Amino acid sequence: MLARNYPRFRRRDIRAIMRRHGLTDAPVALLLGPGRPPIRRLVHFMRALRRGTRPTREEHPLFSASFYRATNPDIASAGIDPWLHYQVFGRAEGRSPHPFIDVSRLAGQLPDTLTAVVVDAYLMRREHWLLSPSPYIETEHFAAAGPWDGVTHPLVQIAEQYPAEPWVRARLSLIDLVDARSPERHALAALMMLDPRRVHAGRLSVWSRTAPPPSDSHGAFRVVPGFFAGLDGTEIVAIGREVVSRDGTAVRNRHVVAIADDGERYTASTLVVAIGELDHRALGALASRLDGGDIVAPVDVQQERALNIAGVRTLPFGRQAIVEARHLELCGEAQPVQIEAAAALTRGGFTPPKVRTSGVIAAHNQLRWIETAIRSLAAEADEVVVVDDGSTDGTAELLETLVREEGFTLIRNTVARGVSEAYAVAVEASSGEILLIQGGDDRTLPGRAAASIAALSDPSVSLVHSDPVVIDADGNVLPHGAAGEFQEPHVSDVLRYLVETGNFICAPSVAIRREDYLAHGGFPAGIALLQDYALWIELARVGRFDRLDAPVVEYRKHGGNLSREYTGIDTARRRRHAVELSWVRERFIQAADRRDLDRLGAPAAANGQLLARDDRALLLSFALGDQGVFRRAVDDLLTRVAKDGVEVLDTLGIAPGDVAELIYRADPENLAALGRSAAVLRALGDSASG
């Protein structure tokens, strides 16, 4: 093609150029991008090879030089141009060109394609466009429900125009950081997905996590106060438990710290890194022995301000910095910081800024307990929003009196609209970044807001909860076993446990981000018993749950609260519970992407062939053990067999002889359903005899 269109490129010259650089074929895929026509890009590349010079910077949207250089330190140390190295060597060796592409994952989906050309096949063959290039990139969802133009490769369009949620699941990548199989590559990919601007700009580096160097270390220290300090590519100390720094420039797992080089430069005689609590006496002693040539990396914003008031030079808390220092000193104990300094500053007339919290209560006929519920929540939250959902027992009148005393926001529904709609109204009227959810008969315990804010400062956390202290109608504490349904099980995947087994989260203990509540639709309308469970599943899909060490709520058990109405006492409510449970699970299955299905253990292949998403979802429906979901799955299977023939069964790996058993298990007493299935069974019999 080159020789035909460009006579100056003779075939033997092209072959000689490719042979000299070890190329068995032209690396076409990543030359197909916006700008020049593909043939012109290939000419440009061949000229660069022939002259032995690096090509002009006109890289493909799915090649990141900064990512490639950082994940391949052998290239960086040799001074080889990343783009040229990838095309000549990295492509054949299966190296990843971009944080959105996991070559080994693609190779697993294209088993008959050589690893050296798997990226080419994925990008050039339209039938492969909807494959999953990474567990964190939603190409299939983007093409089906997103702003895909139908012409450009979906992944290219995501990388160029939409490199953020919901198409790029950056928060999910943070969840998997701890146990990543390729810790360097995974940490860098997560860092770049958090801020897509880093994909094609900026320097990235990977720092090892080893034993601290001697205290007389000196040089250019890299510091993110409250998170990390290191020297010469090695971590000196890790601070806190977050996986991502406050400024988003560093992420870490058990093995490495990935850093985007983005810090201001400072010089100091001694760099003091605070790694934990400093009480008033320690702060005073530190301030008295430091001089103007020293600098402190504070562990939190309160410590920073206390030191500033004492005249000590500090680094900005949570922001990356590079400090040229002759000495290093670590101070404080590596433990959660007690905010004594903040209290002293407040008494001095200075109030540090903080994340705003909104307490939300949906109340219905809770006259006996509503005042205690509101006062306990108001002591913790920055604002409280109460929605009275058509109470008829005097609750509404009491709230009118309390609102004048307590100053909370009160909204009244003249008729009861249900728990879901009441909370939706409360959240809509709130203004805080974090929601503290509570019932009108429960009590919030001191420290709830601070603990919730600290846990949600980690962006990989989507929900915070605790075990409750269970009390009766009179406020008496019940035995620990009374909260058995809320005791967290020891499971490796919260999403899988929720879907397969059920709810274990005590809703009045929950704190979530307001933006997450809104993004996932809140509590579904029309659900009377399991509205919280439905939302927890959605939040488990995108983040991890953090269980606090100490209870943050007193959960009241009495004859009227919802949680006891489906425990077997009331047959009608028990049936409603079963129906709602099936509905929630069905909703999850319909929305589940490939990663969700992987987490639930849905089969990925049958009879040696990869399964489509809908086929995997159908097989998962059979495996869940939920009668309502099972019945719907059998109905779907029969519909597909009637429409597309018995080949559907072979695709799913279902033996024709098993279909009758599936039908019977779905609805053994429903003769009408069995009658509708007769035609399918006859077709299966004819197929078997044929």
Image (cartoon, grey):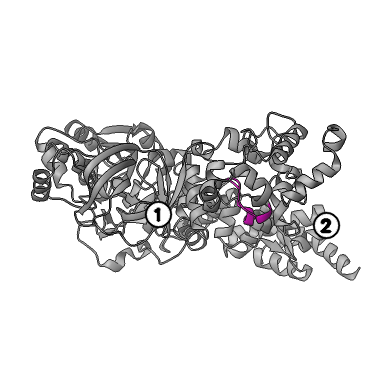
Residue found at the far right of this picture:
690
Front-most of 570 and 277? 277
Q: Callout 1: few (<14), some (14-19), or many (20+) C-alpha neighbours within 10 Å?
A: many
**Residue 97: image location, x then y, percent:** 61, 46
Assess whether mark 2 and mark 1 are in contact (beta carbons under 8 angstroms). Answer: no
Q: Secondary structure at mark 2?
A: loop
Quarter in which the N terminus is drawn: top right
How many numbered marks, from 0 up? 2
Residue marked by disc 2: 645
- Judging depth in this view, the residue of 444 and 670 nearest the camera is 444
Q: Is residue 355 left or right of residue 570?
A: left
Which residue is more in the foreground, 557 or 338?
338
Q: Which residue is mark 1?
A: 545
The kind of residue tagged 1 is Phe
- For this view, does 348 lie left or right of residue 223? left
- Residue 103 lies in the magenta stretch: yes
- Kindly give the residue lying farthest to the top in the view shown: 35
Q: Is residue 571 left or right of residue 411?
A: right
Estimate the x, y position of residue 387 in percent, counting from the top left: 33, 37
Secondary element under disc 1, as helix, strand or loop, is: strand
Classify residue 367 by image quadrant: top left
| Foreground tag (1 vs 2) | 1
Evaluate whether residue 288 shows in this view: yes
Q: Is residue 604 above or below residue 136?
A: below
Quadrant in which the C terminus is drawn: bottom right
Q: Which span is picked out in magenta? A: 92-105
Amino acid type at image mark 2: Gly
Q: Quadrant of residue 608?
A: bottom right
Q: Nearer the viewer, residue 203 or 648?
A: 203
